[in-house]
Amino acid sequence: MNVTFWGTRGSIATPGPETAAYGGDTSCVAIAGIDPEHLVILDAGTGIRRLGSEIGPRVRRIDLLLSHLHLDHIVGLGFFAPLFRPDVAVSVWAPPSTTPLLERLGRYLSPPLFPVRLRDLACELELRDAPEEPVVRGAFTIRAVPVIHPDTAVGYRVEAGGHVIAYLPDHEPALGPSFPFEMTWTSGATIALDADLLIHDGQYAPDEYTERVGWGHSSTLDAVAFAELTRARALALFHHDPWHDDSRVAHMTREAQAATGAVTVTAARQGATVTLGERRASVPAP
């Protein structure tokens, strides 16, 4: 599998020279497998616009997995070009709710916030609840579990060809009296277990997190502890804080690397591609 980061920033897009190295677009990750007609996409932040412009005519099936419906994770949806192609089938997955997904997404994709409604899209659109049990989609097996974050949010486990990607972009596993907990008591641990690549919230430095407990995000060192607990092979710190420029992200990443010898740690960089092969992740250095 090839995993490409199209958006790595959290909360709000922050384009500019001070964020050029790690990226200013909000969450969006694409996973390409052996079938050139099928693509799995994680979240629809501002990064999905550029991804959509790069998707060629061979892609006919897309599974778009939304971790939650906070605006920074769906704001790019209306600018995703394949939604306007009648030859593409798009399945959008999101955390279950008593309110239908059509209504929840429609609050954004409708006037006065957006001029195009979901019903006006040209693609073959399917809206589904994130799967609590493994679901096979082409060459991929997908599973979701609820995680600690304000409002309803999930993390995803995507498997293909013997390789595992775990995606927990907005996650606060350390919320509680002590951390790390036992595996069975730790939010999101079951889907991250033995992942070749763990893409995990690392928004805060440890000193920042102490003032933001309960906000739904992790410190870089808690992300490392989570990766070690779940025996992840590689950790990509994700959801970079909008107030952190490239030098700050690089410094936090070095601190995280120094805290572990068991996990390969890097910071997710917009435009970087991670190739999974032979049960290992080849991760670009920061």
Image (cartoon, rainbow, N blue to C red):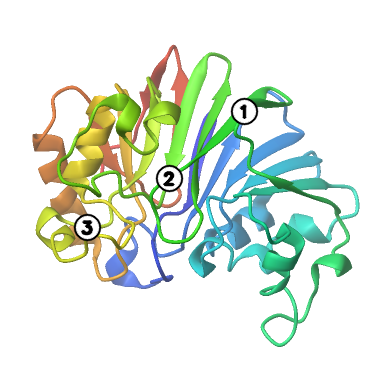
Task: Work out whether residue 94 or residue 235 is closer to the camera in this orientation and state it.
Answer: 94
Q: Is residue 254 visible?
A: yes
The local crowd at label 3, few if under 14, some if 14 to 19, many if 20 or more residues have their Cα within 10 Å, is many
Instruction: Work out whether 97 lies above or below 4.
Output: below
What kind of residue is marked 3?
A: Tyr
Secondary structure at badge 2 equals: loop
The first of marks 2 and 1 along the sequence is 1
What kind of residue is marked 2?
A: Val
For the point 68% across and 38% down, the residue is 39
Q: In which image quadrant can residue 258 be found?
A: top left
For the point 40% across and 71% down, the residue is 15
Instruction: Work out whether 9 lies above or below 202.
Output: below
Q: CA distance from mark 2 to mark 1?
A: 15 Å
The local crowd at label 2, few if under 14, some if 14 to 19, many if 20 or more residues have their Cα within 10 Å, is many
Find disc 1 in the rendering and name its residue.
133
Find disc 3 in the rendering and name its residue.
204
The first of marks 3 and 1 along the sequence is 1
Find disc 2 in the rendering and name its residue.
147
